[in-house]
Image (cartoon, rainbow, N blue to C red):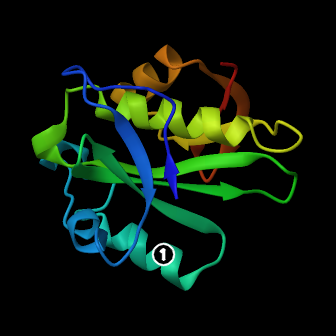
């Protein structure tokens, strides 16, 4: 499975989302954030891969820019029918290139186009100002709800 909506990084490379499989799982697992981001994401994307392999709620996707694995993102369907984006981690070597923004836009577009056009939500720590700025710029608006102490935001497109 490949999810693409013609979103690109700053260099013009297509950013696509792929099923994590035998060909890419090691590259995804090795993705690591910058040290200053470790308060909000794990040291390696491998933690997200273990989570999605042990629980049936979340589904992992590899983030590619061109043909290169650059990160991880995951999604889930909640009991109320809404869809959630979580576990985004762009490798430190690939940050500040628009890959994360393109990955979120791609996944939000894909999720919202599903049957019944479900709401698409995500959450972030109130202290994570870069995430708040990114998600607001992408069209996510805080709902006023909290999830595990995090701000819940819904995509308004």
**Figure quadrant of residue 59:** bottom right
Q: Residue at x 58, y 18 (%)?
A: 139
Residue 98 lies, in percent from the top left, at 29, 26
Q: Which of 41 and 16 is in front in this view?
A: 16
**Figure quadrant of residue 152:** top right
- Res. 39 visible in picture: no
Q: Which residue does the numbered mark 1 point to in the structure image? A: 51
39 relative position to 4: left or right: left
113 relative position to 33: left or right: right
Q: Is mark 1 on a helix, strand or loop?
A: helix
In the image, residue 136 sits, relative to residue 42, either above or below, namely above
Give the quarter of the figure containing the C terminus: top right
14 relative position to 125: left or right: left
Residue 111 lies, in percent from the top left, at 67, 42
Q: Which residue is drawn at 25% across and 21% down?
A: 12
- Res. 123 visible in picture: yes
Query: Callout 1: 10 Å neighbours few (<14), some, many (20+)?
Result: some
Q: Which residue is drawn at 22% across and 63% down?
A: 43
In the image, residue 24 sits, relative to residue 156, either above or below, namely below
């Amino acid at each position: 499975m490949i999810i693409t909506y013609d979103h690109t990084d700053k260099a013009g490379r297509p950013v696509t989302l792929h099923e994590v499989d035998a060909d890419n799982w090691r590259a995804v697992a090795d993705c690591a954030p910058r040290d200053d981001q470790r308060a909000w994401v794990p040291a390696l994307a491998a933690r997200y891969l273990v989570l999605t392999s042990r629980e049936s709620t979340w589904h992992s996707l590899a983030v590619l820019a061109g043909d290169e694995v650059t990160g991880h993102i995951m999604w889930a369907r909640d009991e109320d029918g809404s869809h959630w984006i979580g576990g985004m981690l762009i490798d430190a070597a690939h940050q500040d290139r628009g890959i994360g923004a393109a990955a979120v836009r791609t996944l939000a577009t894909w999720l919202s186009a599903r049957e019944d056009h479900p709401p698409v939500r995500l959450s972030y720590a109130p202290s994570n100002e870069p995430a708040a700025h990114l998600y607001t710029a992408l069209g996510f608006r805080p709902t006023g709800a909290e999830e595990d102490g995090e701000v819940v935001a819904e995509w308004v497109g």
